[in-house]
Image (cartoon, rainbow, N blue to C red):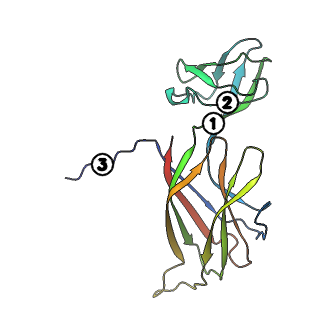
Amino acid sequence: MASQPSFAATPIVGAGVAPATNDTSLTAPTNVTVIVSATRTIASLTTINASAAVVAGDGSFTSNDEGKSIVATGIPSNTVISAVTDSEHATLSQAATASATVSATVGTAGLRINELALLGLGTTANGRLNIFLKDESSAYHLRDQFLITAVTPSATLEVFNTVRAYSNLFVPAGWSLVVSVMETGNESLVEVVASGGSF
C-alpha cells in the first residue's frame, strides 16, 4: 500500500477563472483575477486601546499564525502576532492604538507555487494569459505568460489545457498571484489552478 505524500509546508491550492474583460497592459492591468494570495482575512477582530491582546470573533487563530504580520485599523504598522492562546485570543508585538472591532489581514511567510494548470472552459481563441505578482502597494510585476490556442472542444477533441511546473515562483508575504487575458475571445473561458505550499 502506497503511503500518503508529506509536505514540508502546508499545501495550498488556489483557483480562478480569467477575467470577463481583456486587458492589454503588461505593467498595470485593471482587469485581473486573484488566483492565490499570501494573506487571509479575519472578518471580526476586536482590539483594545493600549493593549496587545486581540480577539478574533470567528475563532480563526492557529498556532501557525505566530510570527505573521497583521494589518488593521488601530494596529501599528510592522506588527506581528507574538503568541496565540487559543483560536479566539492572541497577543500582538505592539499595543493597539484604538478600541474597535475591525477586519484584519494576516500575512503568511509567503507561498511557493510548484505548478500552474490552465484549462479551457469552452471554445478558446489564440491569445495570451499573463501571470502577475501584485505587491502590497498594488503594483504589478509580470512573472510569466502562457499562449492559449484556439480549440473548439468536441467528442473527439478535448478542451485547451496546459500545465507548467516551477522551481522558483514565490509569492512574498502580503502579495498575490493574479492573471489577465490580453486578447478578446478568452474572457471567462480559462480556469487557472495554482498548486504549492506555504512557508
For residue 4, the mark is 3
Please provide percent x and percent y for residue 26.
75, 66
Q: What residue do we see at 67% from left, 66% from top? A: 130
- Figure check: 127 above or below 17: below
Q: CA distance from mark 1 to mark 3?
A: 29 Å
Circles 1, 2 touching at the beta carbon (< 8 Å): yes
Q: Earlier in the sequence, mark 1 or mark 3?
A: 3
**Badge 1 is on which residue?**
107
Please provide percent x and percent y for residue 71.
72, 31
**Viewer-proximal residue, 168 or 185?**
168
The amino acid on which the numbered mark 2 sits, given as a three-letter code, is Ile
Left or right, residue 199 beside residue 68: left
Please provide percent x and percent y for residue 190.
61, 70
- How crowded is the residue under tag 3: few (<14 C-alpha within 10 Å), some, or many (20+)? few
- Between circles 1 and 3, the one closer to the viewer is 1
Please provide percent x and percent y for residue 34.
67, 55
